[in-house]
Amino acid sequence: MVTFTLNGRQVEAEEGSTILEVAETYNVKIPTLCNHKALEPAGLCRLCTVEVYDGRRTRFVTSCNYPVWGGMEVKTDSEDVIRHRKMIVELLLARCPNNEFVKGLAAEFGIEATRFKLEEDDCVLCGLCVRMCAERMGVSAISMTGRGTDIRVETPFQIKSDACQVCGACESVCPTGRIDVREIAKYEPRPLLSDWEVGLQERGAAYMPFPQAVPLAAVIDGEACAHVRTGNCGVCREFCEAGAIDLDMKEEIIEVEVGSIILATGYDLMDPSPMKQYGYGVYPNVFTSLEFERLSNATGPTGGVILIRDENGELTVPPKSVAILHCIGSRDVNHHEYCSRVCCMYALKYGHLIKEKVGHETKVYNFYIDLRCFGKGYEEFYRRLQEEGITFIRGKAAEITDQAITPEEEGKLVVIGEDTLLGKRLRVPVDAVILCMAMEARSDALDVGRIFGVSQGADGFFLEEHPKLGPLNTATDGVFIAGACQGPKDIPDAVSQASGAAAKSLALATLGKVLVPSTISWIDPNICAGCQTCIGLCPYTAIEFDARRGVSVVNEALCKGCGSCAGFCPSGAAQVRHFNQKQIFAELDGVMDAISAVGI
């Protein structure tokens, strides 16, 4: 440790530390443009200059790369230092007079105008982008070119670079926002869209999955991370104060023994892109229900302010009219014949939110087939929205277009449909359209079902053991289902199912043993020929082959006694206990004897 004076105060610091590092420790602010935690200090901007007295003379040094030593006296805010910094800022203002970052920096130092000749540039020549690309990314796709007043940051020969890996590191460190990776790279950058924000917002390669995630920790996208792909970068590790980032960690599979399993895999929202008539992906202000859910949410990309896209594709404009289209993909013989159940009520909720947040003068149109307000207080909520002035049109919208045929349709989306109550066609011009998309089974439901021995219905959702007596059980003991993986349902139903599944799992754990039914299959080892036909037929994977004895063996804990093996066994070795041939004929004889006894 060394002791020195910092602004008249005795301080201690580790030997080898820089003045800037020690100043930050003691909450002494020193401005800098070119310093970055992930880069070696270079002192290029000179804005971090401080005054150092060594006992004989005073000199000015850049604090970001000047090491501390015992007995030195450092002044970070003397008159000469402040005058020096103001001169640098004034020169920057002359170079970039229209840059918002530089104007803000000048305002901090009380500089309203510069005495030097104005230029028309937007780069402060801090060198951060060049050094980041070379030192951390190992590419050097951009560099400083020219000399003196002609020095600039650009690609070699001023052509788009083949070497650029479109990582965006240069953009992320540029203080003035001057760097655009599209001007550097030969390849078009691929934005990383947030799954949580349903593609409405971009994210980084290191990100939080969503608020209140369990565990609440950041994750790194291996496909997008520059360090994973190239072995360079690793900037995130420099900034993590907790030291929680291990870039050498490998993926591993963990096996956990459990007594019961609850499948709560949820659902997928139907992709409306194939339904060309609704213009999703063509017209920027056609949103899905989940996208609007994020737009209206306080934690969403707009902070809960309901906005639609402007001409540049940015969410900046409040809508003056909105159409909400029910049953898109649901109750449709071309897609899903079932009702998605939740659409009617969240469509009503969206209308209420639009009126509440945007303004009661906003026009809201609901195109519906039938309104199914079946829950507690739902019908009352429907009547409340009618009183709020929302227009309900009974009829399914046929098409969305931007082709105007009247002046009021200019610059609008036009919903073409029919009011079946009035028996007339309609053209409704609106600013935005919300598609209430169908809930459908997850794309990986088939694979999950095979792993856990759970069957699927015709609609793709998991099948319960019995729709009334066993709505949470599956054909596999110890495996329960909860939520929308069983079928479309709203939050109260999903929560109650989850509670019931948890209680059933707890009951199994408390019991400590599993009751196995007696009517299960068995294979006579004296008859079995070892053809293994039964193994492929068993839907519960309850049959294994004993290679030592050359026969198939039934796992009694897994078998459900369905009889598939017994029906197809070519040698007749597979049978269902209590349902073999002798027992069935004995039952028939008993029935016939009873009939004969009563004289029928």
Image (cartoon, rainbow, N blue to C red):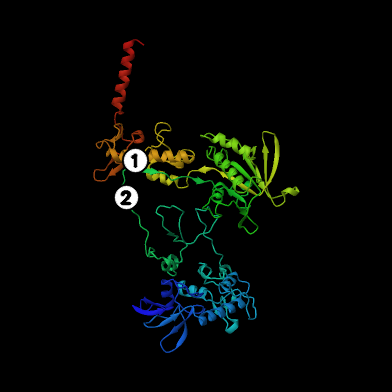
Q: Is residue 122 above or below residue 337?
A: below
Q: Is residue 529 visible?
A: no
- For marks 2 and 1, give the CA distance: 16 Å
SS under mark 1: helix
Asked if residue 533 lies left or right of residue 348, the reply is: left
Q: Outermost residue, front direction?
A: 8
Q: What is the x, y in percent for residue 376?
A: 51, 34
Q: Residue at x 41, y 75 (%)?
A: 22
Categorize mark 1 by other alpha carbons within 10 Å: few (<14), some (14-19), many (20+). some
| Amino acid type shown at disc 1 | Ser
Within-10-Å neighbours for mark 2: few <14, some 14–19, many 20+: few
| Residue to which mark 2 is pinned | 256
Q: Position of residue 563 (x, y in %)?
A: 35, 33
Q: Nearer the viewer, residue 477 or 13?
A: 13
Hey, which residue is sitting farthest top in the picture?
599
Residue type, label 2: Val
Residue in the picture at 54% in, 57% down: 201
Q: Residue under circle 1? A: 505
Q: Position of residue 179 (x, y in %)?
A: 56, 70
Left or right: where does residue 503 sit relative to residue 194?
Answer: left
